[in-house]
Image: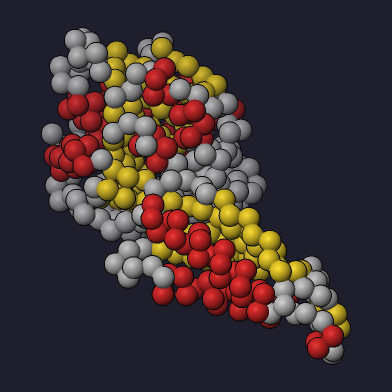
Amino acid sequence: MPIKNRFAETHADITAWRRHLHTIPELQFDLPQTAAFVEEKLRSFGITDITTGVAQSGIVAVIEGKTNASGRSIGLRADMDALPITEATGLEYASKTPGKMHACGHDGHTAILLGAAQYLAETRNFDGRAVLIFQPAEEGGGGGNVMVEEGLMERWSIDEVYGLHNMPGHPVGAFAIRSGPLLAAADEFDIIITGQGGHAAAPHEAIDTNLAAAHVVVALQSIAARNVDPIKNAVVSVCTLRSDTDSHNVLPQTVRLRGTVRTLDAGIRDLVQDRLEAVVTHTCAAHQCTADIAYARGYPITVNADANTAYAADVAENIAPGVDRDTPPIMAGEDFSYMLNQRPGAYIMLGNGDGPTVHHPMYNFNDDAIPAGCSWFAEMIETRLPA
């Protein structure tokens, strides 16, 4: 079961689709050009069971196998949205929209699933239904959750669900996966520290919010260092620190801190939230300030089911021997987690070779990974729904 010959034949076409998508990046749920392109391609493959407008701009397409004695349906998911980043690659197929860029490879994921769809529609060498999920708003919009809330699993009777993501720094076309937590829960916090503004030359007559904020930033690092089991993982990052003034001689009335918390364990997730709120409140009180804390839980932990991880790894091994079956967890978040919370399945990483990492203005999806990705999607259907 190596890379299928059909994908060697269609590689140039799929690459062209990917590069076209790269020129038209769109954000979150607002994907009119992207969704229209995906729908047009699916219809050109002879697929007629297509539902558009799922989660505003998502698409779900169904390919029937030659038989359906099993009565089973397997879901394959690709994300379609881009990022609010200005591209700096200088490629001939670079983004045509300033301030928007496919900097995470979702153009590659979408093209790979389209390539697999073309093959599955041609061959239909399986027993059951392949459900193709083209999802909007992975980058912060929670489109996966919206599709789930709109009844994705029930409406299309999905039994298992699988997805992939490109992985810079891993050999092109190689696979990496692990059972259990693969990607982290992604939470956010927004803290407003209030004191008493004043003249910088008379700090004793003010309550210095900058000093309080500096101590909060340092104190928050004690959570992972001193509260979390060293065997487990947690990240607390303050990403924004901004006062209400921009002056050399004014102590600000308020300072705002924003950041993210990443965890791979539900208990640690609760612990970090509790400690963050306590550390911020008491550190500010020690500096005579008050703190208004808004803590928002984001994407859940992406957890691969044991059996389905083994299925996914076995298929990958036959395509590209040497699968990393115990790859280290990644502290990035992924809203495919919502789908895995509803149905057993697995998420696998596809090597993208050397080069800038995702979310970088110089990132570019490596088209040489396309045949391996297409083969994996197609073989997951043919293996889990044998004819």
Q: Is residue 88 above or below residue 73?
A: below
Q: Position of residue 144 (x, y in %)?
A: 47, 35
x 34%, y 18%: residue: 157
Q: Is residue 234 above or below residue 288?
A: above
Quarter of the view holding residue 56: top right
> Nearest the camera: 36 or 243?
243
Q: Please say whether residue 146 is visible from this viewpoint.
A: yes
Q: Please say whether residue 19 is visible from this viewpoint.
A: no
> Nearest the camera: 362 or 334?
334
Quarter of the view holding residue 197: bottom right
Relative side of 185 to 116, left or right: right
Quarter of the picture containing the N terminus is top left
x 38%, y 55%: residue: 267
Q: Position of residue 171 (x, y in %)?
A: 26, 54
> Nearest the camera: 297 or 172?
297
Q: How is the image coloured?
A: secondary structure
Quarter of the picture containing the C terminus is top left
Q: Position of residue 20 (x, y in %)?
A: 49, 35
Q: Is residue 342 above or below residue 91?
A: above
x 32%, y 50%: residue: 182
x 61%, y 33%: residue: 30
Q: Position of residue 57 (x, y in %)?
A: 55, 27
